[in-house]
């Protein structure tokens, strides 16, 4: 029986993963550690709170005393907590380095000291940088373009260094772009859907020719769970298998499911350092761990759009005013501080 600490478990991907874990009988307890910054919402966990095995702790992964106490009580850590929005990283890279790099080091340090059985570090395909052609395998050079991706690449290397130096059983997962219900409406799919259902216009950078691979969040969580249970320590696993689309092709799908036409689209100059194409090979996790994605993109997009139509109470308060400023995380060394449980 495993006791699993999930950092960032009130975020988009983390909350889906927590619910998935709680469907397994061999999980003794799940503790979510989340700072509940702008993109983390306790409501994302919803019905998971009906399960007595779930504990929620509000706190920051930079709080060393808190992380130490939690690592001591768990056999597995799955690390989602991160600053993750590219545009925000262009405006202020510091919080990305603090949370993503130093936060990972704090967690790995505590995990190594307390003999955690497995440490899964959740990352992104953006660490490989843009590829004009071909696809990145797990040993491909890391060439990130923007501060967000650079901070994730650095955090990958920090996590893997704890395997090589201290023997901490670390695995790293790198997934393509996730989509699905309850994603914060700053990412392109929920941003476009919530605007289109309100009759507003959406904007495409450049000519809309940037290519991304779209993977349903539940498929990503399937892969992460496989790595948590059976991944080889010290290994990296790409999680893909979604559908490659240009942003213009994606926009066309979103227009159709929202009943809008191309008059709702405005083209604007391209974003700074906007990578033209990401692509990964994911045969390793398929061949060694049996991973296979199961969600059809067209059906997944339609169901995702329908979720936003049916749950305006979850996103309407977030789009009434400009996105909140990026908080600056603090490093807390107060060993007398008690965790705040909910």
Image: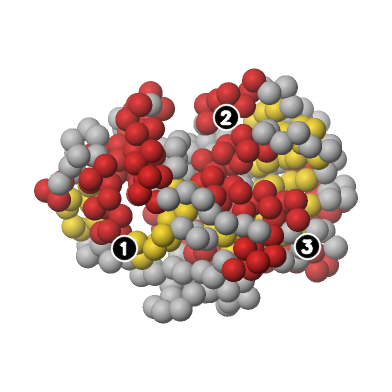
SS under mark 1? strand
- The relative height of residue 305 versus residue 276 in the rendered view (above or below) is above
At 84% from the left and 50% from the top, the residue drawn is 117
- Compared across the picture, whether 194 is left or right of 157 comes to left
Q: Position of residue 121 (x, y in %)?
A: 67, 55
Q: Find residue 209 and report its image quarter.
A: bottom left
Q: Quadrant of the C terminus?
A: top right
- Compared across the picture, whether 51 is left or right of 299 comes to right
Closer to the N terminus: mark 1 or mark 3? 3
Q: Quadrant of the N terminus?
A: top right
**Residue identifier under label 2:** 45
Label 3 – label 2 distance at C-alpha? 29 Å
At 74% from the left and 27% from the top, the residue drawn is 53
Q: Is residue 248 visible?
A: yes
Disc marking residue 246: 1
Q: Find residue 25 and report its image quarter.
A: top right
Label 1 – label 3 distance at C-alpha? 35 Å
| Front position in the image: 146 or 325 | 146
Q: Position of residue 317 (x, y in %)?
A: 36, 27
Closer to the N terminus: mark 1 or mark 2? 2
Q: Are marks 1 and 3 in contact (CB under 8 Å)?
A: no
At 66% from the left and 42% from the top, the residue drawn is 7
Q: Are marks 1 and 2 in contact (CB under 8 Å)?
A: no
- Compared across the picture, whether 176 is left or right of 54 comes to left
**Residue identifier under label 3:** 233
């Amino acid at each position: 029986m495993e006791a699993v600490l999930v950092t960032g478990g009130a975020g988009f991907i983390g909350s889906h993963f927590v619910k998935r874990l709680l469907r397994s009988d061999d999980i003794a307890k799940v503790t979510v550690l989340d700072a509940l910054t702008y993109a983390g919402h306790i409501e994302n966990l919803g019905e998971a709170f009906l399960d007595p095995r779930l504990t929620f702790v509000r706190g920051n992964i930079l709080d060393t005393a808190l992380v130490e106490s939690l690592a001591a009580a768990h056999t597995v850590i799955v690390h989602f907590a991160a600053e993750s929005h590219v545009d925000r990283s262009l405006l202020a890279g510091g919080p990305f380095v603090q949370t993503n790099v130093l936060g990972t080091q704090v967690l790995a340090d505590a995990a190594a000291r307390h003999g955690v059985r497995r440490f899964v570090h959740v990352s992104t395909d953006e660490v490989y940088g843009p590829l004009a052609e071909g696809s990145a395998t797990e040993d491909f050079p890391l060439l990130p373009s923007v501060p967000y991706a650079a901070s994730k690449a650095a955090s990958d290397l920090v996590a893997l260094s704890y395997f090589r130096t201290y023997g901490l059983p670390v695995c790293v997962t790198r997934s393509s772009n996730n989509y699905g219900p309850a994603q914060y409406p700053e990412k392109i799919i929920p941003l476009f859907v919530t605007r289109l259902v309100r009759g507003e216009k959406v904007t495409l950078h450049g000519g809309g020719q940037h290519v991304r691979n779209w993977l349903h969040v539940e498929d990503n969580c399937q892969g992460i769970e496989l790595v948590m249970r059976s991944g080889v320590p010290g290994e990296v696993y790409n999680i893909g298998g979604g559908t490659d689309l240009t942003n213009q092709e994606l926009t066309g799908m979103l227009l159709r499911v929202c009943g809008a036409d191309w008059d709702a689209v405005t083209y604007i100059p391209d974003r700074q350092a906007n990578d033209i194409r990401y692509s990964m090979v994911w045969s390793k996790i398929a061949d060694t761990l049996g991973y296979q994605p199961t969600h059809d993109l067209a059906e997944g997009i339609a169901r995702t759009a329908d979720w936003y139509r049916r749950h305006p109470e979850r996103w309407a308060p977030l789009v009434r005013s400009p996105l909140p400023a990026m908080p600056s995380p603090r490093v807390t060394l107060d060993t007398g501080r008690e965790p705040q449980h909910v």
